[in-house]
Amino acid sequence: MISIDNKLYIRDIDTYIDPFFPVERAIITHGHADHARAGHKHVLCTPETSEIMKIRYGENCASSFQTIKYGHSVKIGKISVTFYPAAHILGSAQVLLETAKHRILVTGDYKTILDRHLDPFEVVPCDLLITEATFGLPIFKFNKPEMEIERLLNNISKNRENTFLIGAYSLGKAQRIIWLLREAGFSDDIFVHGSMDKLCDFYQSKGIRLGTLRKATLDNKKDFKGKIIVAPPSALKDRWSRRFENITRCYASGWMQVKQRAKQSQIEIPLVISDHSDWNELTNTIKQTGAEKVWITHGREDALKYWCEKNGIQAEPLSLQHRDETSEL
Amino acid sequence: MKAFSNLLSDLILTSSRNRKLSLLEQYFSSTPDPDRGYALAALTGSLNFKNIKSSFFKDLIKEKQDEHLFDLSYDYVGDLAETISLLWDQEKGGNMPRLSSLFENLEKAKTDEIKNHIINILNISTADQRWAFIKLFTGGLRIGVSSRLVKQALANYGNVDLEEIEKIWHGLHFPYTNLFSWLENKGSKPKISIYDIFHPMMLAHPLVMEKDLAAANPKEFVAEYKWDGIRVQIVSHSGGCRLYSRTGDEVSKSFPEIIKTIQGNFVLDGELLAGINNDPKTFNDLQQRLNKKAPSEKFIEKNPCFIKVYDVLFFNGDDLRDKTLIERKKVLSSYFSTNRSPMFLSETIEFKDWRFLDKIRDISNKQIHEGVMIKSVSSPYIAGRPRGKWFKWKRNPKNVDAIIMYAQRGHGKRSSFYSDYTFGVFNKEKELVPIGKAYSGFTDEELNRLDKFVRSKTINRFGPVREVEKTLVVEIAFDEMSLSHRHKSGIALRFPRFKRIRWDKPTNEVETLEQIRKSFLE
């Protein structure tokens, strides 16, 4: 048996998965700030995640990086570690810890629906599944993102006087939205907030076509009429947004499924586009992995735990701190 | 139904008033009769349909979805229609009926068929359509659209004054075909009995003594108290009695004991107040009643109300609106020569000169009036706010210094500014306690500076609320102070607003809660 505790510490090999504090050895599932921190000694992750960490935290954010690609393994002591695509953001991985007798899968954040700019999610059979549950309520059932993008483009074509400010997390969501817009045939220049242009460059360097992007720093307000600006959600209502006129606030997130929530945040065009699994994806994945035991790292864990137990699967919430719902925002 | 559900989804997410109006106008112009009539009735809260209760939908979903998972979801979403619409299985496809056939089919359906009928509709609709559909039946759309806004959209659509719509509104009936044909210049204006409608009220101008009356002869004016209740119009005839608020919303249902008692053939204008036997209590007391849409008998007994009447528009079939105020008052005093409880004649104030009234308006130990009204004796009853006829002379605002404690972002144009401020004073224990919230009274320039202050002096965040360093003193103007059990400070301010920002004033010079209570409440 591999011994792992509720902080995702694997004692046999003295390694943490996605720790919040600096440690000797860390496995990092993906580059979001609530999973990837600076200051670890040895980091094991995918090549893309290591590049993202270096972009965000600097070249020296860890003493050493060891990278393995999807489908490849490294042996640490008696445990073999393999990465599988999690289809959450570029480089996001599920981590399989394996001995001859025991398989533990840590999903990290993931989605299972096909997202053509990322490697497709793979189901990995395991004994213990350690899953996220950000959208672990049956009300979360996401439509195809293409439909959401179409709704946005319709709205833009009808309101050419407005400036469309889309709130999207700087890493992953922003690039996915831009990529989806390009796939839908939107060829206009897209403006981006200063916090995301390096990450956009990185995505482009990996062959993900985002088209012509410009910084949203022009002086002339009129330049933004009928245009799309992508910015992190925090900038949506803050002083930064004052430079634009006639703003229509949009927000790309699974949370936008709930109208009342969109209304409270004064969002006029909610785009229900999520990089996390919805309820059906979560429960299907649990079934397909054949896990006997499920640990839930973070999210709306009550409902998922209840569902597991009703289906004869042991379930335990870990309530990992720092990963609350705002991590998706 | 598709168009209607799109309309609701768009409306709930739109904060700009103008955009809401244009969405409504677009809908009315592109939707045929009688569908738009159903929509209009639903939007103005006048849709009368076999009451399908929310528990009916709850039971439906519990047949399909685990009860515990439903409860968890409902807790999270907070809105029943939305919870059910999201939990229901994805649509199976099919032709969504138009709004009118949807209602007509349900109307025709036998009681035992209704359930299957509704299940079928929920099955073929999208989540947004289910949401709109359930909202239609469970009462109260709660999408941030008042009936007044809907009427304004109608007025814009037909290029007529809002007032014209208000005038005939209560005499109009579903499906409003005559209204739409008039608005589209295809038919004449609907003719309505005077007893079926609300008559727009005559309103007063705030008095600026030097400009308005200093040179006028006091003998040409009548003075009354400006009661601190809500303005109501009493429309009574053989078919019953109705009460309307100042904006033309019918409020009869909230005051069943009053409309039951009133008899006669008239349209009167007065003030609804809390209390009995012509003895008014404060606005706070009335607020208890206003919060209840359908009060129980017990609640009514505990919180009685009455009306002080000060004007008459129609009496026994005669239109008195062109008569002078003095003539109308004569009709009233003869009517009130016998006991008409719960209606009473609003007393006039005898006065010789303006100085006397100036004193009167500030005297009130029970806070039941908020100043005086001065009305020209020769004024006819004119809807709207005609010049030089009626004046309100509010008591002077009171002022208090307080310290800014918390700030929150505003809405719309102000959504990037911290423009809503909570302020407080020290209590006996030297603890700062909030006494009110204000978001007006400052200039744009001052708002910029306040916004900077909040951002640089934040010491704590609670969701959208920022706690700031307790260093900034503001002078707050307010109309009334009253006791309140709701607030830790034990007091509540009426209409607080910024008077001055005291960037220079040290916080230790601010009066304490005890001192404030002494000077304003004792």
Image (spheres, coloured by chain):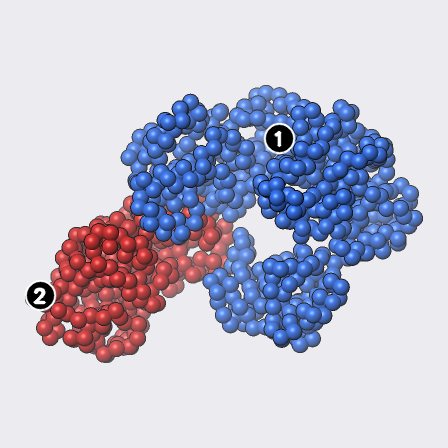
Chain colours: A red, B blue
| Residue beneath disc 2 | A101
Amino acid type of the residue that numbered disc 1 sits on in the rendered structure: Trp
Mark 1 Cα within 10 Å, few/some/many (few <14, many 20+)?
Answer: many
Q: Secondary structure at mark 1?
A: helix
Residue B186 locus on image (x, y percent): 57, 21
Side of B69 relative to B485 (left or right): left
Q: Residue furthest top?
A: B187
| Residue beneath disc 1 | B169
The residue that appears at 51% across and 30% down in the rendered structure is B48
| Snapshot quadrant of residue B321 | top right
Q: Chain of mark 2?
A: A
Amino acid type of the residue that numbered disc 2 sits on in the rendered structure: Lys
Please identify, in this view, whether the residue under mark 1 or under mark 2 is nearer the observer. 2
| Snapshot quadrant of residue A229 | bottom left
Residue A295 locus on image (x, y percent): 24, 62
Q: Secondary structure at mark 2?
A: loop
The residue that appears at 91% across and 43% down in the rendered structure is B219
The residue that appears at 37% across and 39% down in the rendered structure is B59
